[in-house]
Amino acid sequence: DAGITQSPRHKVTETGTPVTLRCHQTENHRYMYWYRQDPGHGLRLIHYSYGVKDTDKGEVSDGYSVSRSKTEDFLLTLESATSSQTSVYFCAISDGQVTGGYTFGSGTRLTVV
Amino acid sequence: SQQGEEDPQALSIQEGENATMNCSYKTSINNLQWYRQNSGRGLVHLILIRSNEREKHSGRLRVTLDTSKKSSSLLITASRAADTASYFCATDAGGNQFYFGTGTSLTVIP
């Protein structure tokens, strides 16, 4: 998707290992979000950022941390991956103008074995 | 949870027919948006309706909002095979955060 990239696209990791997912934007948008998508649950907000070094928790933040040291990068870290964190993770950005909605990345499919 | 709920969960129609999907939510909102997700891709923003609006159109899309019933509907007219996707509503309760529903999976049969 234009202006936002997620890496990696796919990852398999072992239980107990730390994992970091990266979201990079070229739109200079203030707001960035991490969601997870699971069957039957839709998209659930994990963490979001409203500026450099300004982050807050979403509804499913346990076991996750984030960092935003630059406007363009928002990192999501699974401190010690568990099988319940197997999911598809989406990053989204917004300039705060609601009319434009969010722009989503293509997602990272994470499997914890 | 502040999530919305879409209904039906799955919908299958013939090309050319209209598709209607509904979204119900729990709390007062500022705005409601609809998104489309093609298989294996991220979500794409379709349309936004504000809490003081009742109906909005964009091309073949028509969205209605009934704040008294806390519900919205998305109508896709003259559907095409390319409309096959999942559709999500997202509600804004303030703070520039949107809460997404569980989605309606639409299949348009050529």
Image (spheres, rainbow, N blue to C red):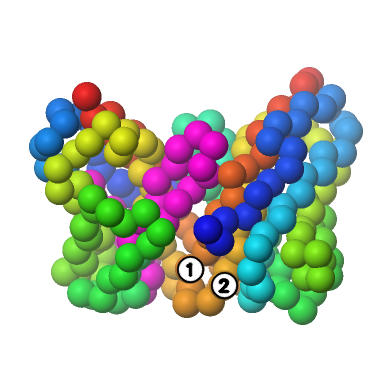
For marks 2 and 1, give the CA distance. 7 Å
Q: Is residue A67 above or below residue B96?
A: above
Q: Is residue B92 above or below residue A63?
A: below
Task: Give, as a three-letter code, the residue at label 1.
Answer: Gln
The secondary structure type at the circle numbered 1 is loop
Q: Quadrant of residue B106?
A: top right
At a point 45% along the width and 38% down the height, the residue shown is A38
The secondary structure type at the circle numbered 2 is loop
- The residue beneath circle 1 is B97
- The residue beneath circle 2 is B93
Q: Quadrant of residue B2?
A: bottom right
At a point 59% along the width and 44% down the height, the residue shown is B102
Please say if the residues under marks 2 and 1 sit with CB atoms less than 8 Å apart.
Answer: yes
Q: Is residue B46 above or below residue B54?
A: above
Kindly tell me whether residue A28 is visible in this rendering: no
Residues at marks 2 and 1 on the same chain: yes
Rendered image: mark on residue A80: none
Kindly tell me whether residue B98 is visible in this rendering: yes
> Is B32 one of the magenta-colored residues?
no
* Pick the front one: B96 or A59: A59
> Which range of residues does the magenta coloring cover?
A20-47
Q: Chain of mark 2?
A: B
